[in-house]
Amino acid sequence: MPVIKSVNKSTHRFRNDFGRNQQRINSSINKIISIMASTDMYPFQSAHWITRKLWWCAGADEYFLMKSPKQDRVKYAGIGGIVFSTGVLAAFAGGFAFNTAFGPKGMAGDDIASLEWTIGSILFGLCWGLLIFNLDRFIVSSTGKGDGTDKITLKEFGQAIPRLLIALILGITISKPLELKIIETEINVELRKTQQEKLDEFNKNTYAKFKDQIALLDADIAKIEGERDVLVQRQKAAEQEYIDQMQGRSGAAGFGPRAKQLEILKDEKQKEIADYDAKHQTELQALKSQREKKMADQENELNVVNKKQAENLDGLLERISIAEEIGFWLGIALMCVFLSIEMGPIFFKMMMNKGPYDYMVENFNYRMQVKNGIVKEERIYEGEKGMMLMEKINYLEVENDRKEKAEKLKAQEELSKKVVGIWSSAKMKEIDDQPVKFYKESDDTNTEA
C-alpha cells in the first residue's frame, strides 16, 4: 500500500507540474501571436506618388503592394512604366499621323503649319494615346501568371495569343508614324523631288491642252485682222495717191478731175474699212475675250490646280512608301523595338514567379468569394485521356435556397398526404355508417350519364 500511495503522489505532482508548464507555454504562444498580430512582417510602407501612379498603370492593387516586399513593388512599377511610355508614344504617333493624313498639304519641307490644325492634332493625339494606354493597361492587367513559374509553357503561350495579336497590331500602328517622324528630313527631300516632277508633268499637259485651243483662236483672230489690214493698206495707198495728186507729184497739182476721182476712191476704201469693222467687230471682240479667258484658265491651272495636285501627294501613304524605299531596314528595326515594348509586359507576366503580392491578392479574392457564398473545390476525375484536375464551383447561397425549397416542398407533400389521409378516413367512416347514401349517389350519376 505505501508504494501505491507514493506512485499516486508522484503522478499527481507530475500532472500539476505539466499543467503549470502547459499554461506557461500557452501564455507564451498567445503573447507571440498577439505580437505577430500587432506587427506585420511587411507593414504598410511609404511609396512615392509616381510609383503609385505606375502601379495604377500596371493595373495592380496599391493596397497589397504597399504591404509587399520591394521585389514585387519594383516589378509592377516597371510594368506600369512600360504601359505609360507606350501611351505617350502612341499620343505622339497619333497626332503626327492625323496631321499628315488630314492636315494642310504643301510642298514637302515648306512651313505650312496652322494653329487650328496643330490644336486639332494635339487633341486627337491625346485621345489616341489614352485609347492605346487603356488597351495596354487592360491587356497587361488581364494577363495572368500562368503556372506561376518563369517558364512559358505551350498552354500559356496559346492562351496569350489573342493578347499578343492585339499588341502586334498596336505596335505596328505606333511604330510607323514615329518612323516617318524620325526620318522626316530625308523623306521631305525625296517627296519634294517627286512633287516637282509631277508638277512639271502637270504643267506640260496643261500647256499642250491650251496650246491647240489658243492656236485656233489666234488663227481666227489673225484671219479677221489680216483681211482688215489688207483693206487698210488699200485705203492708205488711195490716200497717198490722192495726196500726191494734190501736191503735183503725180500730174498737175490742184483739185482737178483726177484728184476728185482719187478722193472718191479714198472715201470708198475708208467706207470699206468701216463696213468691215461693223461686220466683224463683235466676232473679233468675242474671239479676243475667249483668248483672254483661255489664258486666264491656263494661268490658274498652272499656278493653282496643278500645284494643288502636286501638294496633295504629301500624304501618309506616299510618305510610308518613300520611307520603305530609303529606310526599309531602319523601319524594320524600329518596328521590332516598338513591338518588344508593346508585347514585352505580356511575356514578362507569363515569366514572373508568384510572389507575396500575388498570394495576398489570391487570398483576398478567395476570402471575398467565400464571404459571398462561392466556394471552389479542386477534384481529380478520370476521363478518356486519363486523370485530370477539374475545378468545381459551389454556390452556397444557391445551394441553401435549393435545400430550403426542397424542404418546403417535402413538408408540403407530407402535409398534403396527412390531409388526404384524414379526409380519406372520414369518408371511409361515412361510407361505413351510411353505405346506401353513396350507392344512391353512384346510381344517380349513372342515370345522368
Image: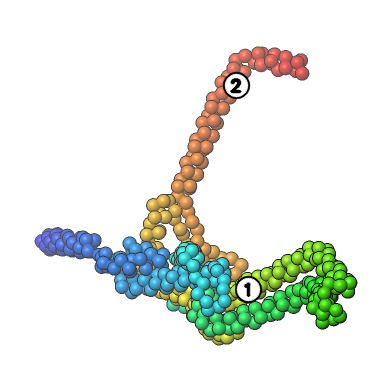
Answer above or below: position of 322 versus 220.
Answer: below
Upstream in sequence: badge 2 or badge 1: 1
On the image, the x and y values in percent for residue 405 come to 50, 40
Residue 396 visible: yes
Residue 303 badge: 1
Q: Nearer the viewer, residue 9 or 70?
A: 70
Amino acid type assigned to the residue bearing label 2 in the image: Met
- Colour scheme used in the picture? rainbow
| Quadrant in the rendering for residue 145 | bottom left
Image spot of residue 352 (x, y percent): 42, 74
Does residue 269 appear left or right of residue 288 in this picture?
Answer: right
Q: CA distance from mark 2 to mark 1?
A: 117 Å
The one nearer the camera, 356 or 341, is: 341
Image location of residue 309, percent across then percent down: 64, 72
In the image, residue 97 lies at what x, y percent? Answer: 53, 71
Q: Secondary structure at mark 1?
A: helix
User: Crowding at label 1, few (<14), some or many (≥20) Cα neighbours within 10 Å?
Assistant: few
Name the residue beneath numbered marker 2. Answer: 428
Label 2 with label 1: CB-CB less than 8 Å? no
Whether residue 222 is situated above or below residue 424 in the rendered picture: below
The crowd level at tag 2 (other Cα within 10 Å; few <14, some 14-19, many 20+) is: few
Q: Residue at coordinates 50% horizontally, 35% vertically from top-left?
A: 411
Q: Amino acid at mark 1?
A: Asn
The C terminus lies in quadrant:
top right
